[in-house]
Image (cartoon, rainbow, N blue to C red):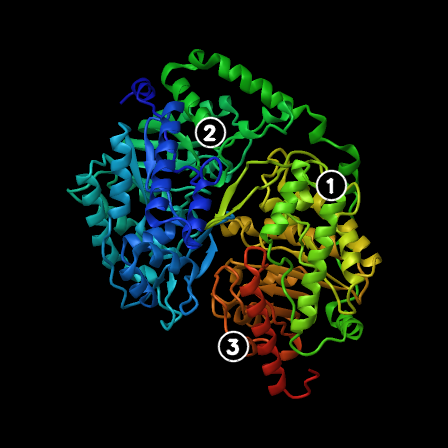
Amino acid sequence: MTATSAAAAAGATVHGYPRQGPNRELKKAVEGYWKGRVTAAGLQQTAKDLRAANWRQLAETGIHEVPTGDFSYYDHMLDTSVMVGAVPERHRAAVAADTLAGYFAMARGTQDVAPLEMTKWFDTNYHYLVPELGPDTVFAADATKQVTELKEALALGLAARPVLVGPVTYLLLAKPAPGVAADFEPLSLLERLLPVYAELLADLRAAGAAWVQLDEPALVQDRTPQELAAAERAHRALGGLTDRPKLLVASYFDRLGDALPVLAKAPVDGLAVDFTGSAAANLDALAAVGGLPGKRLVAGVVNGRNIWIDDLEKSLTTLGTLLGLAGRVDVSASCSLLHVPLDAQAEGDIDPEVLRWLSFARQKTAEIATLAKGLAQGTDAIGAELAANRAALASRTGSALTHDPAVRARAAAVTEAETHRSPSYAERTSAQRAQLRLPLLPTTTIGSFPQTTELRTARADLRAGRIDPDAYEERIRTEIRDVLAFQEKAGIDVLVHGEPERNDMVQYFAEQLTGYLATRHGWVQSYGTRYVRPPILAGDLSRPEPMTVRWARYARSLTERPVKGMLTGPVTMLAWSFVRDDQPLGDTARQVALALRDEVGDLEAAGTSVIQVDEPALRETLPLRAADREAYLAWATEAFRLTTAGVRPDTQIHTHMCYAEFGDIVQAIDDLDADVISLEAARSHMQVAHELAGHGYPREAGPGVYDIHSPRVPGAEEATALLRKGLEAIPPERLWVNPDCGLKTRGWPETRASLENLVTAARTIRAELPDSTS
């Protein structure tokens, strides 16, 4: 096929689309089902209606082939486990009794049965449920969900492409099931899994699928020769099937490296490749392997993870180069649009000039359709769109919002001394212990307490003008008093004020910093029914006035016990925002760190002796390729130290991380030079405690003993058993007792019971230890 005919055949598609609906209808239906207010049939109808609305919107925008199967009630990796029959033994009875209830039991657990482990999806803030596999795992195909959703789209008269997590990625992201040897390699099950995928593909072909997409994003990470050989075997086997649809193998989030020639040579019918950011290297790499002659290339030229408008002319240049490298070139986003909000035009509070710079899922589909039209018909066919795009890009570049000389001068003047705390941890720990006078195994929580209906109502009433600021603040004071009183009664040693005034751990600060924009409807799924509204960091950043000091001072006035000051760290402020892409991320991190450094200093001056700077996104933002990690970790850890290094020796600095694979960054955790770190550990069975010990981590640590992403209440015996496992790795004088994460999403009854059990567990262990001061 010539370049001209390839251009004529160019189409537009996407890998996936936001699931929640314009008003988070899915969240409300699922949570209603959990509470018994919505029937299973009602939930299923809501989901069906949302899928149909999404597909129609895509088609009306100009998307020629819609994705199916990307929709999920909770998580697409959990859906894959169900699809291949990998249901853990402890959940099989529940799934057999009620498929939908059993599905949610795997995600959330029950009082008697623990859920699947949860962790981050590559370097995003989306969380997936980790498959549990072992040598006895028996796979079985269940194409019900995929076939049902495909038939729904086909019934609407749409060209549709089912999207499945590929077999190699599924196995690489799995872990050994509980009780299975830690060195078991789930990838060893590949030959057992491939026949199941063959059956699924046959079922989808019979249901009318012309194409099926196999997502293999794990191949953009560093892979061993054995793993690459497994990828070659898998795609050769599936590509060699006779009873199958055409196969499109997709990768995203980074460059493919050594995996690109493996996929290019596989007997599949096309590849979907990311060409944005660091993945732009895929362009030269594709040319180096001779392209994809006679095959389909779905070119991810529109960034699916940020919210800035695409540079259409730049993307057209990339697409023009790709025309000579494949039999057919279609235009797409770099990855699923799951990672961006739905519609920028819903944001009526944002300055119209700034709104021109923003592109959410609906706008990105329009950009994709425009690029496909330009590729097929030439740039004259999209002249008006190109002119508007140029004007919007120029507006952003020249805006005063994006450049503050004072902020830039302060960041440029930072010295090496400002990024290191003195004296060393070994010297300052005695001053902190004398100041705080805590028992062995001190108990604390991570920061937030339940955000009750009353709190949310009060916040909504304030926005709507139904109550005045004085009435709202009295509600906050009452909540803080209640939270502190409960903690004192329960016997918690280091208290928190519960954060009732905060809408979100990033947005709360973003709304008080220059350079940030807040959205009203910019919801993005984090996990399950948990949606966040990442703020938009559009320009240079500074702190006009203190952000947390007033409420911290009020909380301290109510108790003699230490109350932690609570801040969100610079890396997490960036990772959980849509960050500017017009300067190096490290430069932006330094601006955030300086603003937070001022806040830390004001908290200390107000008498706060324990200050927690949360960095749960430090691991999440770690580059997928090892070659890129040293530079990232250098500026990321420097930003944390710049935030915290100005305090006195007797001020104790805490940090917190959760729901990620920490083994890769233990040295970086050490380099933060925090005095205490709390980490998620309950679902992962104290794995992180042993990783810290293996590194020789010298500071204090609190591996969590209460999984807050499940409604179940862990008994005191369960928490005690976890603490004993923690003590195998961390000595008692350096072990803290805490939940995995904040309690914002939990209800008060389970929170009270769980924390009381946590304190009981700590007291039980203290009584067993010599020289206990309990």
Q: Is residue 38 above or below residue 480?
A: above
Where residue 389 sits: x, y (%)?
Answer: 54, 20
Q: Which residue is mark 3?
A: 725
Q: Are marks 1 and 3 in contact (CB under 8 Å)?
A: no
Q: Nearer the viewer, residue 400 or 67?
A: 67
Instruction: Give the Cα separation between the discs numbered 2 and 1.
Output: 37 Å
The quarter of the image holding the C terminus is bottom right
Q: Is residue 26 above or below residue 120?
A: above
Q: Is residue 527 left or right of residue 739?
A: left
> In this rendering, does residue 504 appear at all?
no
Q: Earlier in the sequence, mark 3 or mark 2?
A: 2
Q: Earlier in the sequence, mark 2 or mark 1?
A: 2
Q: Earlier in the sequence, mark 1 or mark 3?
A: 1
Q: Secondary structure at mark 3?
A: helix
- Between circles 2 and 1, the one closer to the viewer is 1
Circle 2: residue type? Arg
Q: Nearer the viewer, residue 102 or 623?
A: 102
Q: Which residue is mark 1?
A: 468
> In this rendering, does residue 454 appear at all?
yes
Q: Which mark is residue 362?
A: 2
Where residue 606 sits: x, y (%)?
Answer: 83, 57
